[in-house]
Amino acid sequence: MSDPVNFDFDEYIRQSEPEKQQKGYIWQTAIGLQDVDGLKPSEYLIETAKKNIDGDITLKEANELIHSYYESKTARIDAENRTEEADKVSARIAQILSEDAFVFSPEQFIAIHRRLFEGIYKFAGNIRDYNISKKEWVLKGKSVVYAGSDMIRDTLNYDFDAERHFDYSGLGIDKSIRHITEFISNLWQIHPFGEGNTRSTAVFSIKYLRSLGFEVNNTLFAENSWYFRNALVRANYSDIQKGIVEDKSYLEHFFRNLLLGEHHELKNRHLLIDTEMQPSEKIGDKEKIGDKKSAINVRNRQAIIAFIKDNGTVKASQVAAAIGLQPSRTRDYLSELIQDGIIIAEGANRNRVYRLK
């Protein structure tokens, strides 16, 4: 069986006829966006996507097949990996991104959430009525301060109204992208939904950017979705006592690559706050001798441990993609962490996975 995590969409798209490539890019984005919540699709979803790309079935039929698959008695839902959610939401994102219809409004944003998560979350399409916090590995367990539940609707209306009346004429591309970065950052920080906020924001953003006339680089969005989320986190977090202020430069680099084809380096490890550690500071539950490791090695180890802690059981390829390291260097770090007794490995070869000890 093929590994859906390692399926090479780029190669598959390149080998497709030109009229099939657009569908391929849409599926690539839809599947890639699941990575913002550490979700991976099933092989069945990948095969269904390929059938749609090849023209054997329509997007509507693809969605129906995925729905029927999880309705059948033979389908086994993996609650740990939330595979059903990854599959269904991927198919729904593909459907939405294939449609031209779009209205710039809070109602459209809410409708996207409803369409993506209906039947998955009971609160699909509903604005949260409780306050939240989320521990972020990029913030070393801290949380962004999200909008209070009693202010969500008013804040949404205010931000949409301000953006609707914003005049882009004569602004220039640099200032335009800086403003778009600010708007999407603020929209995400409102966090109107209990779960699925980043995926809904991403889909809405792609539709909005298209409505402004931008050609969106779907491949970049698919391959850097986790960076996108971490950049949103850094754009909305401050700790003045520690000298940390909101930094939207990472998110702006993402959008400049996305919309202008620039080549800013998008590495998740660069977004970690307070990454330099004292020689005797602990990583996980183990002591780290600082004079034997450079600051960059300590930072990378910390990023790997945080990623494994947040995602439970992971493959080396997932770690490499998330942290932005070469596969060989990633394996070196994983071996060190095993020797230090911080993580353990299970399985062999392609099935080898890592988790905290």
Image: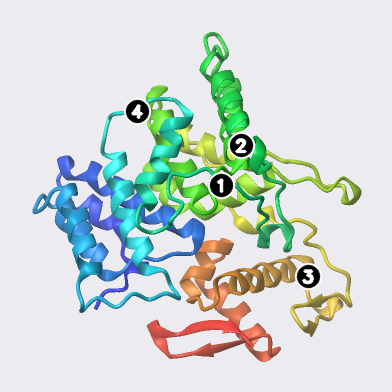
Asked if the residue at tag 2 contacts the one at tag 1, i.e. Cβ–Cβ closer than 8 Å, the answer is yes
What residue appears at the point 63 percent right and 78 percent down from the top-left corner?
Answer: 333
Is residue 270 shown left or right of residue 215? right
User: Disc 1 residue type?
Assistant: Arg
Q: Which residue is mark 1?
A: 128
Q: Which residue is mark 2?
A: 152
Residue 217 in view here: no
Between 126 and 235, the one nearer to me in the picture: 126
Looking at the image, tell me whether mark 4 or mark 2 is earlier in sequence order: 4
3 vs 4, front mark? 4
CA–CA distance in space, label 1 to label 2: 8 Å
Q: Which residue is mark 4?
A: 102
Q: Position of residue 37 (x, y in %)?
A: 50, 60
What residue appears at the point 42 percent right and 22 percent down from the top-left corner?
Answer: 212
4 vs 1, front mark? 1
Image quarter where the C terminus lies is bottom right
Q: Position of residue 229 (x, y in %)?
A: 56, 50
CA–CA distance in space, label 4 to label 1: 24 Å
What residue appears at the point 72 percent right and 47 percent down from the top-left corner?
Answer: 145
User: Disc 4 residue type?
Assistant: Phe
Looking at the image, tell me whether mark 3 or mark 4 is earlier in sequence order: 4
Residue 93 in view here: yes
110 w.r.t. 102: above or below: below
User: Disc 3 residue type?
Assistant: Ser
Between 66 and 240, the one nearer to me in the picture: 66
255 w.r.t. 171: above or below: below
Asked if the residue at tag 2 contacts the one at tag 3, i.e. Cβ–Cβ closer than 8 Å, the answer is no
Q: How dense is the environment of label 2, judged by Cα within 10 Å: few (below 14), some, or many (20 and up)?
A: some
Dot 4: what SS?
A: loop
Q: How dense is the environment of label 3, judged by Cα within 10 Å: few (below 14), some, or many (20 and up)?
A: few
CA–CA distance in space, label 3 to label 2: 44 Å
Q: Residue furthest left?
A: 56
